[in-house]
């Protein structure tokens, strides 16, 4: 992974709004106008260049505010990749970040995260992955029951 800029360098280049999550250019250079919004959206994330290197804004914001490189991944709590407001960011492990999924995978046919129909007996299987270990919670007569069981298991075994 490429090295991230220092907090001092980021503070010199940008202003950051904790409330809106927006970075603004603090200097006019390389065709950039002073005070304009820094970065562009790509795949839902705000990305920007520092010294010719492209970075995800949320990782730079973490350093800007804390002075520390993230230990893991920076999670957008509300699932909105473009929302870089400080209250919406947290440093989590990849596993924890995976549990904050919003929406269903394209191949999901049950309408519930972590629930699939077992072809052998037609019941619905609830599963969850914790620390790269796939756990089968059980099988249930309906997808709704399987989803409820998965959410209860998740609430009991995964800290917020």
Image (cartoon, grey):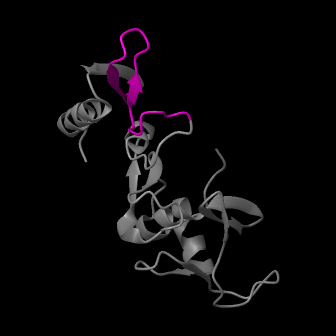
Q: Residue 66: which quarter of the image?
A: bottom left
Q: Nearer the viewer, residue 74 or 2?
A: 74
Does the magenta segment cover residue 26?
A: no
Does the magenta segment cover residue 118?
A: yes
Q: Is residue 26 placed above or below 105 in the rendered structure? A: below
Q: Is residue 38 left or right of residue 18?
A: right
Residue 151: x percent and y percent?
A: 25, 38
Q: Residue 79: which quarter of the image?
A: bottom left
Q: Is residue 88 left or right of residue 16?
A: left
Pick out the residue farthest to the bottom: 34
Q: Nearer the viewer, residue 142 or 107?
A: 142
Residue 6: x percent and y percent?
A: 57, 64
Residue 134: x percent and y percent?
A: 38, 21
Position of the N terminus by quadrant: top right
Question: Which residue is pictured at 34% across the width and 22% down the height?
Answer: 125
Question: Which stretch did the figure color magenta?
Answer: 107-131
Question: Which residue is pictured at 20% across the width and 40% down the height?
Answer: 155
Q: Is residue 97 placed above or below 5 in the rendered structure? A: above
Question: Which residue is pictured at 49% across the width and 69% down the height?
Answer: 64
Q: Is residue 29 left or right of residue 101?
A: right
Q: Residue 113: which quarter of the image?
A: top left
């Amino acid at each position: 992974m490429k090295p991230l800029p220092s907090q001092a360098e980021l503070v010199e280049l940008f202003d950051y709004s904790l409330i809106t999550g927006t970075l603004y250019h603090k200097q006019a250079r390389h065709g950039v106008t002073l005070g304009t919004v820094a970065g562009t959206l790509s795949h839902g994330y705000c990305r920007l260049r520092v010294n010719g290197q492209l970075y995800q804004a949320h990782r730079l914001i973490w350093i800007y505010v804390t002075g520390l490189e993230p230990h893991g991944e920076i999670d957008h709590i509300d699932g909105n990749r473009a929302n870089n407001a400080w209250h919406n960011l947290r440093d989590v492990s990849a596993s924890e970040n995976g549990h904050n999924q919003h929406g269903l995978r394209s191949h999901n046919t049950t309408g519930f995260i972590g629930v699939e129909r077992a072809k052998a007996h037609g019941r619905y299987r609830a599963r969850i992955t914790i620390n790269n270990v796939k756990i089968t919670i059980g099988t249930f007569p309906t997808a709704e029951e399987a989803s409820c069981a998965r959410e209860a298991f998740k609430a009991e075994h995964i800290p917020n």
